[in-house]
Amino acid sequence: MIKILCIKILFIGGSGLARAYLNLSELTKETFIQNPFQTVDEKLLGINNKLYKTGDLVRYLSNGNIEYIGRADIQAKINSYRIELGEIE
């Protein structure tokens, strides 16, 4: 159970979520976790077994919404490209 207003890193899942990680095993290990919410039926079908660590800090509000707080790292997203701010001089 997630506590209301507690800031955490957002994990998301779904088919086709991270095609860019294909054949990048080290990056995949760092960025994905086993899905603790996977149902028995999904396990039997071999689907919905991973969650993607977005790096976004969020909190769950009492009305059911998720509020974006910021980033857990020093990345920015510009035109759908992730930029490491430390690499810009």
Image (tube, helix red, strand yellow):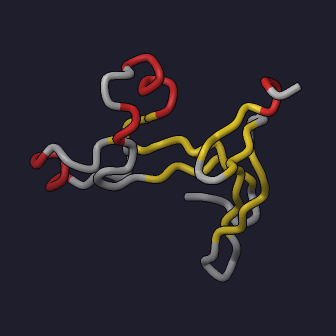
Question: Please, which residue is most extreme toward the top here?
Answer: 26
| Point 75% across, 46% down: residue | 71
Left or right of 35, for residue 76 = right
In which quarter of the view is residue 25 placed? Answer: top left
Horizontal and vertical percent position of residue 28: 42, 27
72 above or below 58?
above
Left or right of 44, for residue 72 = right
Horizontal and vertical percent position of residue 58: 70, 57
22 above or below 12?
above
Question: Please, which residue is most extreme toward the left here?
Answer: 44
Which sits in the foreground, 21 or 65?
21
Left or right of 43, for residue 58 = right
| Point 78% across, 24% down: residue | 87
| Point 78% across, 58% down: residue | 69
- Tally the numbered discs: 0
Which sits in the foreground, 6 or 71?
71
Question: Please, which residue is most extreme toward the bottom here?
Answer: 63
Quick one: quadrant of the C terminus? top right
Quick one: quadrant of the N terminus? bottom right
48 above or below 21?
below
Horizontal and vertical percent position of residue 33: 43, 35
| Point 36% across, 52% down: residue | 37
In which quarter of the view is residue 53 placed? Answer: top right
